[in-house]
Image (cartoon, rainbow, N blue to C red):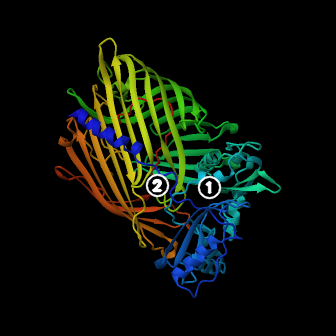
Amino acid sequence: MRFRGYIVGAAWILLPFFLPVLAAGRPTAVVPLAAAVVQDTTTVSDRARIRAGWRRLDALTPDSVFVASGICDTSLTICDFSLAARHPDSLGIGTWMVHGRDSLTQEERTQRFYDTLRVRSERNGFWRFVHGLIIVPHSGGGVPLKPEIVDEEALYGVYDGRRIDSIEFVRKSVFEPARSYLEKGANAVHVTTGVRAVRRDLLFREGDAFDAGTVVRYKQLLRSRQYIADAAIEVRPVPGDPEAVIVRVVTRDSWSISADGSIRGLTGQVKGMLYDANFLGTGDKLSYQLSLDWRKKKYEGSMFQYYIPNLFGTFYEASLRGGRSFTERYYGAALNKKFIQPHDYEIGAVLENVRNAVYVRYESPRDTVSAPYMLHYNNLDLWGGKSWYLPDAGSSFYGIARFDYLRYLDPPRIYEPEDPPRNPVELPVEEGMNPYFYDRILVLGSLGLYSERFLTTSLIYGYGYDEYVATGYRAETVFGYLHSEHRSGCYGGLALRAGGFTPMGYFMGDLSVGTFYDLRARRPFQSALNVRLDYFTNMLGRGRFKVRQFASLNYLNGWNRADGFYEAVWFTPQSGPRAMHDSPLGRDRLVLSTETVVFTPWQPLGFRIALYGFGDVGFLGYDKRVFRNDWYATVGVGIRLKNEMLVFGTIQLSLFVNFGKRGLMSNEWIQLTSEQRMQPMRYIPGKPEQVSFR
């Protein structure tokens, strides 16, 4: 029965391999102003306006138009012609808007409202201060809600092979234009990102041949930086030299100085953090965390961290962190160079000394443990690898090796506020018990093939801004050897991952299976299977309300396990019915989650509104026939509010209820949080890992 489930899971994972992936959905680009002239259409019908717009397109020469498509929504009184144009003077990405019957769109009416607030606030110093505190200056229409897919490689591809004559950089501050004194003061305090920080992320240089794939990777890399709010790349031919182009990189900074904090109920523990994600305009992040116990009136320590996303333009990420906070004592450094290009190398190192309290849960015939335990260990992790691009296959072959050394300096003991504790209780660590706490040396290697490219879209993981969605695959085999104080053996594993757009939507699948094998005892141990399938539909609905359906399936199975911590699993916020508190333990876990999101046309005062309903069901237990285990579920509804003109993030309010086989469970019933963005799946390889069983 177990293998039947494996076959079904593998079939779901391999599905994206056999479904046709759309290379490009609906590419969009802006037509040069000389060609895209918007005429006055206030006296003609909607269809006449569309015909007039297409006559403008027909006037373009065949060499100038690459792809064209149009849509007109009469209920919104806007016609939107999305174009991808090849023109000798310019190339950009955007939309051509032809206004309908109403001379003012909803966004223009909203903008007039905010302009009125700004004008009236300037009459009084106090209200001018309040306005500047919460209102972000409008940057020309905001980010359009456009669910289409954009293949930027196809758009930039018209310049492939031409010589890059020069690279220009335009850097904009946070508030441009700065209207109020507060905005001008903020720009004065903020150090605009230096050219060196933008240039160090370049994947090409002057004199190189233009490559659209490399340009898109550079653009995606820029937008992933926390200190960059937006980035654009413009390309134009060099006058008098048709074989050369000028690349213009335009970036706008985000406000990088911020504070964060937390209060743990009535315990008295307070944490406060101040950080600058663009320290002195270098793109580096400096953070300081202060911990206090207000009930004991006691200082609990400070934590410092300095993070460099790209060290001297080598694409090495470097971080240095140290300090203490309540139960945590951490001192460590990390250096990591990831795969970026198809032909590249990867290298990394982590050195850390950690002392921290971890909540330990497990069940065994002798004992049931559910308490925090103090851990103290040193860890040295080293890895490195190389990839080679295979043009005929359109993929990269890679190999990576890893060495991981972990040593516990003290036996795990139950945490008590007194240090040293009055009655230390040590966790049993012995043969067949709590292998998570064994001192060990792990040597792993991986070989595989991968391919990854990006498409641009929106309204998937974020809300109203451009997103890069990775498509591709990765297939690898993992092998190695584990030496620990109580058990040693060889390791073997297989991992498959694939994802892409299909006519039915976007599929992302991941399958990994692996086990250790004790050569002396001639038996496997710590075997695990992890299957994950994510899916979201194309944008549904032709009216004013747009709908997208999300679904996720995750199956985790462990066998040949010992007793102790992480030899069984439970529901977590990342993998389980959301908002679950009292979760049982088991070795077979299946979770199905669905969410329906309705993007509404309502924008009162500029607030964009999305309604959503969700349902999660999970099975967890020790029975290999997973559906015979106990089941638990969460259902609920919620609303998300987003205003591009306010400094606040997306506000998410959800109402839900938890229940299971035995009825209702403990509930919070209501949550008000900031929206947690899902992380899109990537296909670039990293350091070799054994199958996660968490």
Residue 619 position, x and y percent, is: 24, 44
Residue at 62% from the left image edge and 55% from the top image edge = 155
- Say which element carries label 2: loop
Q: Please, which residue is most extreme toward the bottom here?
A: 43
Residue 413 position, x and y percent, is: 36, 28
Q: Nearer the viewer, mark 1 or mark 2?
A: 1
Q: Amino acid at mark 2?
A: Tyr
Residue at 83% from the left image edge and 55% from the top image edge = 240
Q: Which mark is residue 461?
A: 2
Res 103 quadrant in image:
bottom right
Residue 519 position, x and y percent, is: 34, 13
Q: Which mark is residue 155?
A: 1
Q: Nearer the viewer, residue 139 or 75?
A: 75
Residue 655 position, x and y percent, is: 32, 62
Q: Please, which residue is most extreme toward the top here?
A: 520
Residue at 44% from the left image edge and 57% from the top image edge = 675
Q: Nearer the viewer, residue 557 or 311?
A: 557
Indicate which disc, 1 or 2, sits on the residue closer to the N terminus: 1
